[in-house]
Amino acid sequence: MDARSIIARIRDRQALTPGEAEWFARGLAEGGVTDAQAGAFAMAAFLNGLGSEGRVALTLAMRDSGRVMSWDLPGPVLDKHSTGGIGDCVSLLLAPMLAACGVFNPMISGRGLGHTGGTLDKLEAIPGLVTEVSEDRFRDIVSRVGCAIVSATGDLAPADKRLYAVRDVTSTVESIDLITASILAKKLAAGLDGLILDVKCGSGAFMATDEEARALAQALVETANGAGCPTAALVTDMDQPLAPAAGNALEVAVCMEALAGARMDSRLAVLTIDLVAELLVMAGVRGDLDAARLAASESLSSGAAADRFGRMVAALGGPSDFVENWRGHLPLAPVTVEVPAPRAGTVAGVDGRALGEAVVHLGGGRLKEGERIDPSVGLSHLAAIGDSVDAGTPLAIVHAADEAAAGAAVGTVRSAYALDDGPVTPPILIRERIA
């Protein structure tokens, strides 16, 4: 078996076998496959596809190219993955809510990608908190607290890390087969008993149309289940930010308000409750979605989820009193400027990608790999689709490091909003469920 013959099979639209996938993934991880061969493989898969069996084979092979975790805990091990969007801070709520409901959530997460924020960047807005921990410490936190959100170690699906880097420079990132294998290889290496996927769709998402989002969700669900991990997906709206804020510390603040039981009817809380409920039913912790939603809601209103979050923050090096005094711990930007509505009307549309790019250019994201980010900057009090505004009413508040950056962001944010004269119906939050 060799790389050339495997690439030729994909080029000629023949099925990728489990043995071939295993050989190729091992070659990616150990260096036996060259960058040129990895690029040719990625382009062949991009143009011709791998098919459902090939996706499963590649996913399992990349999962097994490094360490695969296993757990011995008194409850199911569950997780969530989101395809990314603006104001998507679900993970910071979901992890402690699951823990409060009696299940374990070892969440291996990532940093900001393009115009979307990263869970690790948001969590690290908390002073002193560190997400790069040893496996032993990760296991200890999960067993004691019930949840931990950390960064991936180098031995987790190393074949995927290599192939992803090649895809990024060969214009093959958009391949659904390769996206699916990449996402699931890392998630399944965490040793999960169940997985829920939040596939975003709309102006602030990577998948802009219903058709694109549905195709990705179906591929992910089919492949994960084929790989032996019970999985379902929700296709959710990203035609506007999920939370009323975008930016690392600002999104943590929104989550702290939700953990205090405030705004239980917000889009963020509603979606997180539904995602938690799906997992609780999937794992048999609750018998139906109504009972599971009630349990998820009570974890917020009772303060149980907030307690788990505080314990997780402290275990990762953050302040031991963060839940009680989060306002005093989170960094504040030195400049805040309102973005006034140019006229009276109703918010009819939001360019989510433009808002995300505004946060990146404020310093809240990375324009180049390895750049340091400013956790204090971003946007808050974002107007939502369907909101009525008067001329001069703030559409958002910009949090910036200086006046020049604030001024540039104001123009971008104002242009991202479309106003109409009549009433506007807000978009449906959960567009579709795929099991």
Image (cartoon, grey):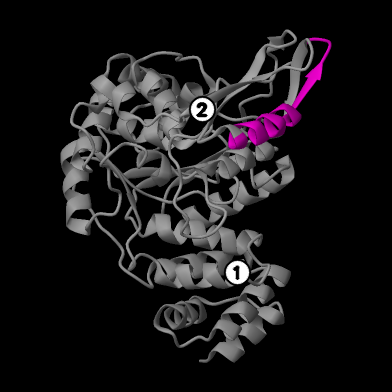
Mark 1 or mark 2, which is nearer to you?
2
Q: In this view, does 303 lie above or below 228?
A: above
Secondary structure of the residue carrying tag 1 is helix
Specify whether residue 435 is in view: no
Mark 2 residue type: Val
Identity of the residue drawn at 65% across and 62% down? 175
- In the rendered image, the residue lying farthest to the right is 421
Q: Which mark is residue 335?
A: 2
Q: Which mark is residue 167?
A: 1
Q: Quadrant of residue 146?
A: top left
Q: Position of residue 237 (x, y in %)?
A: 63, 32
Identity of the residue drawn at 60% across and 90% down? 5
Q: Where is residue 71 in the image (x, y as percent from the top left)?
A: 22, 53
Q: In which quarter of the image is residue 47?
A: bottom right
Q: Which mark is residue 30?
A: none
Instruction: Please provide the residue range marked out in magenta.
Output: 404-424
Identity of the residue drawn at 60% across and 54% down? 219
Q: Main secondary structure of the magenta part?
A: helix
